[in-house]
Structures are given as structure tokens and as C-alpha cells.
Amino acid sequence: MARLKLLIAEDDVVIAQNLSLSLEEMGYEVCQTVSTGEELLLSVHQHTPDLVILDITLEGKLDGIDTAAMLAKSTRVPFIFMTAFSDKETIDRAKQTNPHAYLVKPFDARTLQSSIELAIHNAGTRQRQPEAHMITPSQAVATEIDETDNFLLHDTLFVKVRNRLEKVALEDIIWIEAQDIYCNIKTRTGLYLVSQSLKNLEQRLPPSQFMRVHRSYIVHLTAIEAIEDNNILIGGKQIPIGNTHKDALLKRLQIL
């Protein structure tokens, strides 16, 4: 029988290594350990784990609860929260994502294995009784923008970061890159991961400022620094120009 494949998200390197060793000793396969929610969301689609174990406190812009909420929207991969916090506010936030089990640090090997078995059992029960709110990755691509995640208002994009909405001016966005069913939005000062497809974002951005130049990229036209061969140069990054977009792009530029 194939071993269960687990993915760990923990920002403490020592804890992550010890947890990985413990799980391997129990007979599980640890496909990867990551320290941020952004890495976890990308790794899930690369490794297709049977279970995710994630700390509620993570590095990056997404905490464990935000990450789990995005994971639940696009996959059926079960997940276990682990945390040193057991206060009511944290528990209440975590409960909204319907975790398959919950571990409070510190925990021993027996508690860990029991939680994994419980999570796998709960996942099987939920799959036999599909929930109406669950969507597949392909459906997520076509899903309209979630009002609790991202808001577009005139010249401003609001992006959910942990438990608040951060305002991002459209003029500060320099490029957007598709990452499976998610997108990276690069601004002049930072990088945001949002649970929207590139197609959805393209439809909501003003075409006078933004243009799709590749199946995986949208660029802010005024941020283009140079075009070299079949690449756009923006902020030290080379963005490929798709063959189907090249003529339309050149028509938008004033070439002397």
C-alpha cells in the first residue's frame, strides 16, 4: 500500500525538521516542508499531497487560516491546523475553514498520529457527502471574484492579507503572473498572492492601462522599460511575449 503523502507548512525550521522526522518514522512520506502560505498553495498543486499540516502562524502575507481558506476553495485536500494559540478568537477563525483536525502545541507523537487518522477519516466522510460550497480547481478559474477576498474600486484594488484588506493602487501594479488557479500581483513595493485567475483579473483591470501579453502575464503598459527579442523588461524581470499578443502590443506602443 502506498504511503500517505504529507505536506508541512511551518515557519520554525527546527519544528519543521523535527515534525518531518517524526512523520517519516511513523511511515508517512513528507513530500515538502514550506514556511509560507504562498509556497503551500503552489506546492499543493505540484505534489498533490494526501494531507496538509499547517501552522496558523506563518511567514509571508498569508497566515495559516487565510491559506487554509484558499486551499478549501480550490481543492479537497484535507488539512490539520497546529498552533501554540488556543484562545477563543483564534479557534473561532480557524473553525470557519472547517479543518479536519486541530493540534495545540506542544503535542506528542501519539496525539499527532491520532490527529492524522482523524483528519483522513473526516476527509473520507466529507467526500461521501459533498458540500455545496466546494469547487474544483477548474471551476475556481471561472468563479466570479469573491467579495470577501478582493475588491476593485475605480483606481484601487483591495487585496486580503491575513485578516485585513490592503489597498493597492492600480498605478503601482507593474505585472501580474498566473500561478495555476492563483495569481501573483507585483507592485513597485511588494508581491501579493490572490485566489483569482488571470482571466478574472484581466476582465476587471482597465484595458487602457493593462494588457495581456502572454497566457501567463498581464503588464502595466506604462511600466514597460524595454522590449528585447521576445521579452518585455520590467524592474529587472523578463516577461515573455506570446506570439498571439505581439502584434497587438506593438500597435499600443509609440515606436520611432
Image: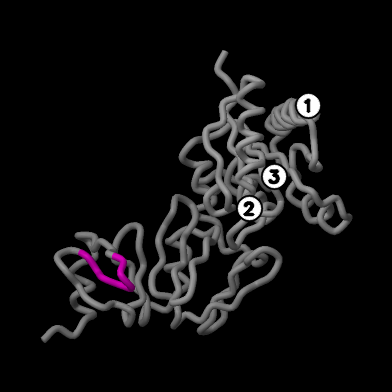
| Residue 124 % position (x, y) | 70, 28
Q: Who's the residue at 54% across and 51% down the image?
A: 140
| Residue 51 % position (x, y) | 63, 34
Way the structure is coloured: one colour
Name the one closer to the observer, 38 or 208: 38
* Pair 3/1: label in front: 1
Question: What segment carries the magenta color?
Answer: 231-237
Residue extending furthest toward the right? 88
Dot 2 crowding, Cα within 10 Å, few <14, some 14–19, many 20+: many
* CA distance for labels 3 and 2: 20 Å
* CA distance for labels 3 and 1: 28 Å
Q: Is residue 230 left or right of residue 109?
A: left
- Please name the residue that numbered disc 2 is placed on: 67
Q: Which quadrant is the C terminus positioned in?
A: bottom left
Asked where in the image residue 157 lies, by quadrant, the reply is bottom right
The relative height of residue 149 versus residue 70 in the rendered view (above or below) is below
- Amino acid carrying label 1: it is Ser
Q: Is residue 59 left or right of residue 174?
A: right
- Circle nearer the N terminus (3, 1): 1
Q: Secondary structure at mark 1?
A: helix
- Please name the residue that numbered disc 1 is placed on: 114
- Please name the residue that numbered disc 3 is placed on: 132
Q: Secondary structure at mark 3?
A: loop
- Amino acid carrying label 3: it is Ala
Q: Is residue 89 left or right of residue 228?
A: right
Dot 3 crowding, Cα within 10 Å, few <14, some 14–19, many 20+: few
